[in-house]
Image: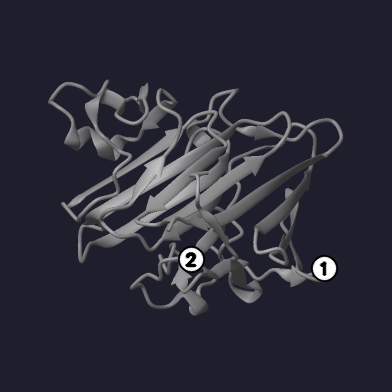
């Protein structure tokens, strides 16, 4: 935290009926979550195509792949106590409790499934940020560029058939990613490996996201869409996504790239989000 920065209390709102989606993360007169242009989010049914409505979507057991953005975003969650929601699927049960009583948002998760069950989870947070914003993560963090980045690299850089290209943060393969700048018609996804804590810095405001989980791979995914996606009617959307696992698509995940349910049959993790403002 920068010397002289003061805490900004955060408050959160969510929509249990529509995938448990976080609809607001606000504090200090600022709304951090971006709202998308795509209509129809409330009419979504299981197995429908993903609707990019913004906010923070819960992605499990995959982000990309099948089903796109996972199984839980398109289904209603039910209440299981104060500030607690649960969703049951044939292969897992996910419980989430969110609190913001202290001004710091704490989301506690517990996934129950058969031992050996493999999954990727991401808090798919799309943020409303200015062109001056940047993502602060430890320099040198191993980072995986995903295939849409190939078009932004010199010809022949991308290995044929590779699901990703490795390089150090903040400029893997020479592509600078920490600046979340002005729209330039590009869109690129990346995963910062073994990176459980990042800060988003936007002028005087700082948003810190930290993921705690014992014995599982922890990453931060970045979706930097500066008006490069979708092909028709592209728009700006910036995703900073705490993640269990190390790949967007569970189908691409090697033995060390996915979370795995241990013999006890449960995985528990915590996402903490806090905000500060400099003078």
- The mark tally for this picture is 2
217 lies above or below 126 = above
Q: Residue at x 78, y 44 (%)?
A: 113
Q: Which residue is drawn at 23% across and 33% down?
A: 150
Toward the right, the furthest residue is 264
Would you say 47 lies left or right of 233 here? right
262 lies above or below 4 = above
In which quadrant will I find the C terminus?
A: bottom left
Return the residue at label 1: 80
State yes or no: discs 2 and 1 in contact (Cβ < 8 Å): no
In space, the residues marked 2 and 1 are separated at their CA atoms by 22 Å
In this rendering, the label closer to the viewer, 2 or 1: 2
Q: Residue at x 81, y 71 (%)?
A: 82
Residue 84 in view here: yes
Q: Where is residue 204 in the image (x, y as percent from the top left)?
A: 39, 57
Residue 69 in view here: no
Q: Nearer the viewer, residue 146 or 137?
A: 137
Return the residue at label 2: 55
Q: Which residue is drawn at 65% across and 64% down?
A: 103
Q: Where is residue 132 in the image (x, y as percent from the top left)?
A: 27, 53
Q: What element carries label 2?
A: loop
Q: Position of residue 225 (x, y in %)?
A: 29, 52
197 lies above or below 40 = above
**Nearer the N terminus, badge 2 or badge 1?**
2
> How would you rate the neighbour count of disc 1 (Cα within 10 Å): few for under 14, some for 14-19, many for 20 or more?
few
Q: Nearer the viewer, residue 18 or 43?
A: 18
> How would you rate the neighbour count of disc 2 (Cα within 10 Å): few for under 14, some for 14-19, many for 20 or more?
many
Toward the left, the furthest residue is 155
């Amino acid at each position: 935290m920068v010397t002289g920065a003061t805490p900004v209390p955060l408050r959160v709102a969510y929509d249990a009926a529509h995938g448990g989606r976080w609809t607001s993360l606000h504090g200090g007169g600022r709304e951090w979550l971006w709202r998308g242009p795509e209509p129809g989010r409330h009419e979504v049914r299981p197995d429908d195509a993903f609707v990019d409505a913004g906010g923070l979507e819960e992605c499990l057991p995959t982000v990309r792949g099948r089903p796109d953005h996972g199984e839980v975003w398109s289904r209603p969650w039910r209440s299981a106590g104060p500030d607690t929601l649960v969703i049951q699927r044939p292969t897992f049960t996910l419980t989430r409790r969110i609190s913001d009583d202290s001004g710091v948002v704490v989301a506690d998760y517990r996934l129950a499934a058969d031992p050996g069950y493999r999954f990727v989870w991401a808090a798919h947070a799309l943020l409303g940020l200015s062109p001056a914003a940047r993502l602060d993560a430890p320099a040198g963090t191993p980072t995986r560029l995903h295939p849409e980045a190939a078009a932004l690299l010199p010809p022949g850089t991308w290995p044929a058939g590779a699901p990703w290209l490795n390089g150090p943060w903040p400029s893997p393969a020479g592509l600078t990613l920490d600046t979340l700048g002005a729209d330039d018609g590009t869109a690129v996804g990346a995963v910062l490996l073994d990176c459980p804590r990042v800060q988003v810095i936007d002028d005087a405001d700082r948003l810190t996201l930290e993921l705690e989980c014992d014995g599982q791979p922890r990453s931060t995914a970045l979706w930097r869409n500066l008006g490069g996606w979708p092909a028709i009617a592209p728009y700006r959307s910036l995703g900073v996504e705490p993640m269990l696992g190390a790949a967007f698509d569970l189908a691409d995940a090697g033995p060390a790239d996915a979370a795995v349910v241990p013999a006890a049959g449960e995985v528990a993790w915590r996402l903490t989000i806090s905000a500060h403002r400099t003078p």
